[in-house]
């Protein structure tokens, strides 16, 4: 990484973060069949990238938010997410619905298929007419595969793991809960927008910038889509006390080439 300061501490932290944040994209496929809908919400992440970014198929976006007890999303982080949508998506109207508490499943960890099953039970907002619907939930357990803050698991769906937020926003060197959630929310929606180089998303790299060692992530450690950006302060690439790590030029170019701003 091109930063000044002691190399060894940075290397140790980077190794730790690499272990925690290897991947946040699950494309293993749906376990359940979707209730009959005109628009399919059970495709792989990235499939609806152009529908998010452009206004040719949908001019409005609505986002349903569910959470388990103890993990209501930070209100400022949701405001930040809406501002992020307004900055990057061609939509006439963007609505993030009032978060709804759902029952805990009383699990210490949740697999991607657990998450899919919960969505099939809880999701009530679907795409129709000119409105594209997205969904995300915050659960009260960790991700079963590895330690991650969030995953993109369907073409319009993300899930986040409350205990990981607790860990990232506690301790003397931590960042605020607002920043942890705001960065995490934006990062996972970046995957739904097709970043970085997700097959069949239409969001193709205009210039090579995929991190070959960390899956569908940007190779720029100052970019929102860098694999470890959800722990910004831990790797020393903060952009300000309460600012949110932005997309870099390459990611913006990719989005714009697929209909985004």
Image: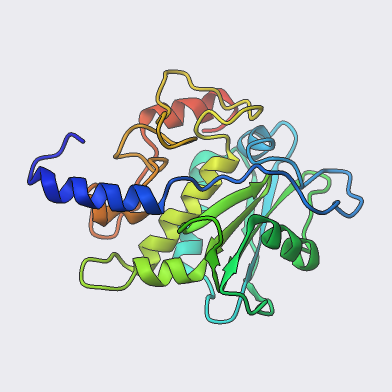
Q: Looking at the image, which is closer to me, 75 or 140?
A: 140
Residue drawn at (89%, 44%) of the image: 38
Q: Looking at the image, which is closer to me, 211 or 108?
A: 108
Residue 158 point in image, percent of width and height: 61, 54
Residue 119 visible? The answer is yes
Tell me which corner region of the image, top left, top right, bottom left or bottom right, holds residue 44: top right
Q: Is residue 97 left or right of residue 4?
A: right
Q: How many marks?
A: 0
Q: Say how the picture is coloured.
A: rainbow
Q: Looking at the image, which is closer to me, 235 or 257?
A: 235
Residue 16 point in image, percent of width and height: 30, 53
Residue 32 point in image, percent of width and height: 82, 54
Residue drawn at (58%, 81%) of the image: 69
Residue 214 point in image, percent of width and height: 42, 37
Give the residue furthest to the right.
Answer: 36
Residue 239 visible? The answer is no
Give the residue furthest to the left.
Answer: 5
Q: In what quadrant of the picture does the N terminus appear? A: top left
Q: Looking at the image, which is closer to me, 88 or 167?
A: 167
Residue drawn at (69%, 80%) of the image: 103
Tell me which corner region of the image, top left, top right, bottom left or bottom right, holds residue 191: top right
Q: Is residue 53 left or right of residue 239?
A: right
């Amino acid at each position: 990484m091109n930063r000044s300061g002691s190399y060894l501490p940075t290397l140790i932290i980077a190794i730790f973060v690499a272990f925690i944040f290897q991947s946040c994209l699950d494309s293993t496929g749906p376990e359940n069949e979707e209730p009959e809908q005109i628009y399919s919400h059970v495709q792989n992440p990235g499939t609806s990238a152009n529908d998010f970014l452009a206004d040719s198929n949908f001019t409005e976006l609505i986002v349903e938010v569910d959470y388990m007890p103890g993990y209501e999303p930070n209100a400022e982080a949701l405001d930040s997410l809406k501002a992020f949508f307004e900055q990057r998506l061609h939509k006439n109207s963007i609505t993030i619905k009032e978060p709804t508490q759902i029952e805990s499943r009383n699990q210490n960890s949740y697999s991607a298929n657990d998450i899919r099953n919960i969505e099939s039970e809880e999701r009530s907002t679907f795409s129709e007419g000119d409105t594209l619907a997205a969904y995300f939930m915050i659960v009260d357990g960790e991700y079963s595969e590895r330690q991650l803050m969030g995953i993109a698991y369907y073409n319009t769906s993300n899930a986040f793991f409350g205990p990981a937020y607790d860990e990232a926003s506690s301790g003397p060197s931590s960042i605020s809960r607002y920043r942890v959630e705001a960065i995490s929310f934006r990062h996972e929606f970046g995957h739904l927008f097709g970043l970085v180089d997700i097959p069949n998303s239409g969001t193709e790299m205009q210039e090579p910038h995929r991190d070959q060692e960390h899956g569908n992530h940007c190779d720029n450690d100052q970019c929102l889509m860098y694999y470890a950006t959800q722990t910004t302060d831990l790797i020393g690439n903060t952009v300000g006390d309460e600012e949110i790590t932005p997309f870099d030029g390459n990611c913006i170019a990719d989005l714009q080439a697929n209909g985004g701003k």
